[in-house]
Amino acid sequence: MTGNVTVDGWDGRGLPPVARARVERAAANGVRTSLLSADGLAGLEVAGFDAVGEVLGTTVMQIGWRGWGGCGWQPGWGGGSSFLGGPRAGEPTSMTRATRWSGYEPYAKAIRHGRDTALGRMRQEAAALGADGVVGVRLTEERMEGQKHEFMALGTAVRSRGRQRPERPFTTDLAAQDLAKLLGAGWVPAGIIYGLSIAVRHDDWRTNTALSPFAGNIEVAGYTELITHVRAAARKDFAAQVAALGADAALMSGLRSRMWKVEAGENHTDHAAECIVTGNAIVKFKTGRESTPSSLTILPLRSIR
Amino acid sequence: MTVQTQPSGVPDDAMRRLAQMRPGQPTSLFTSDLSVNEFLLVREAGFRPLGLVLGSSIYHVGIQFGRWSQNRELDQLSQAMYHARELAMTRMEAEADALGADGIVGVRLDIEFKEFGSELAEFIAIGTAVKADAPPDGDGGTWRNRHNQPFTSDLSGQDFWTLIQAGYAPLGMTMGTCVYHIAHQRFWQAMGNIGQNVEIPQYTEALYDARELAMSRMQAEAEQLGAEGIVGVQMLSNSHRWGGHTTEFFAIGTAVRPLRADHVIAKPQLVLPLTDR
């Protein structure tokens, strides 16, 4: 990204000049903007926070080189080729680790870079406003024309009414009401976390026979292995990120997986799958006696439509 | 759930904890896809989330041969839909068992037909494995079901809380499915009905048959678990990719057993919300 300098003289580091100007103006004049609903504002009040301003982080990336899309299977090498450190035939090959078989590594790296940059810029804006955290974050990825992807993080920066400040602003995609409930129960969100995994599997005679029209009712074991593999790897990555942050637990807010066909070569296709797990890392701050919320059985006096 | 308004300065504890956070410090980490409300209510019901569990199966559904002029169950398709779900559920339960869970709450069971292969679908079961703080009072004192497997429940955290409060425990998810073909009308019959308001008995009967089969299969599963009843039953009908005359009728619910003799919950307080929704 460095090396490209825009007409405004921005080299891609820190915040773009317009965002910098907006944040400085917001910090100076004291006008508070927020993306919260009335309920959200009430929730924030209960939690002991004030809204400071809406904050945004965005980046557009070109993801052209997805990597070498093959599966590592070479017919001439006896299929297995495990003696070369490659995958054995019929095993899903993880593409998010840097190995000689890491075909989709550039793609996975680009996705990570895009998400992290958007979240990072949003956090920079929040820090510039003197905020302690960002609530109700929406993290989106939109495909634009060509091979361009826009990653965007949008949320409301909040500041605690107390005197303690965290080292860096926390982020959460939870609504302010949920923040209030969590705090009441002794938990605080620490950051938005995601785990990512991409893998590819060579289509072999096992999958091909299971897919023949006359195969009858049969599980396509190869594809199940592939999808199970990426989900497990993404969840493992997710848990590792939560642990790396030093958090106690995570509330998952989304698990997205998809599988698609890859034209690996002439007259041959493979299948690839990816999985992204997104969620909130949370930490417990009330130690000692277990704190639980008190629930009240209520019956709303309204018609439910 | 009520939240007491914090006096100013109370988020201090939370912010201090965030400031003290150290990367990589040892924690007893869990992951869950419960919402905040569900997470807190499950905690209050006396259960600790252990982790997200899931099971999946990508399944090739075979071809059904048969005469299309009759009302009939398409047993090949019924078996496929049942077997694939069973595979996904069993794998999810195995994950929970490995975690030493007492049960799985908030289970979702989804089917996704794949674009890249006709007759190819992924069946996925996903939920949160939980462990109880204490065994239940009374008989045997275990939350697991009679096969010594973790219980499963597709109830939301809110419904799960209410169920436990009312003195019931979930045993397991029970399901029944039936893929049914409704006969095409004979030509002369269709001609005869033109312009008339009449019941078409073979349609009515077909729908009755199919639903009865699905529901009785679900009931048989509950009987096997020794349940007192099934709550939260959903009766779904979906024709997936099979066109207008072939429909899957799918019954699913949570089988429950009583934990005690009385089943009274706290009298609800009446509230008037200041919102439209």
Image: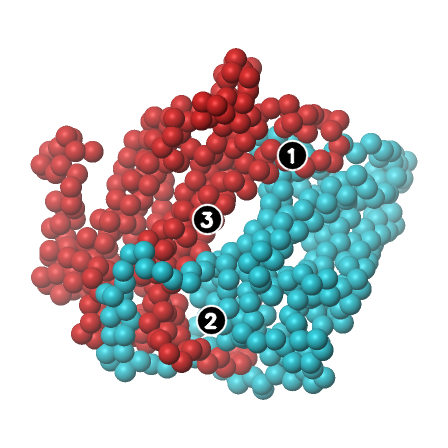
Chain colours: A red, B cyan
Q: Is residue A65 visible?
A: yes
Subunit ID for the residue under disc 3: A
Q: Which residue is identified by label 2?
A: B40
Residue A225, quarter of picture: top right
Callout 2: SS: helix
**Chain of the residue on which disc 2 is drawn:** B
- Circle 1 packing at 10 Å, graded few (<14), some (14-19), many (20+), is many
Mark 2, Cα crowd under 10 Å, few <14 / some 14-19 / many 20+, is many
**Dot 3: few (<14), some (14–19), or many (≥20) neighbours within 10 Å?**
many
Q: Position of residue A82 (x, y in %)?
A: 50, 25
In percent of width and height, residue B228 lies at 76, 72
Q: Nearer the viewer, mark 3 or mark 2?
A: 3
Dot label at residue A220: 1
Q: Describe residue B217's horizontal placement relative to residue A83 as left or right.
A: right
Residue at 45% from the left image edge and 22% from the top image edge: A84
The quarter of the displayed image where residue A164 is located: bottom left
Give me the C-alpha separation between circle 3 and circle 2. 22 Å
Nearest the viewer among B201 and B118 is B118
Label 1, secondary structure: give it. Answer: loop
Do dots 3 and 2 share one subunit?
no
Q: Residue at x 85, y 43 (%)?
A: B72
Inspect the image, locate mark 2, and give the three-letter code of the amino acid beneath it: Leu
Are labels 2 and 1 on one chain?
no
Q: Position of residue B166 (x, y in %)?
A: 64, 79
Q: Which residue is mark 3?
A: A235
Relative vertical location of residue B143 with respect to residue A61 in this rendering, above or below? below
Does residue B254 appear left or right of residue A136 in this picture? right
Q: Which mark is residue B17?
A: none
Mark 2 vs mark 1, CA separation in Å: 39 Å
Q: Are marks 1 and 3 on the same chain?
A: yes
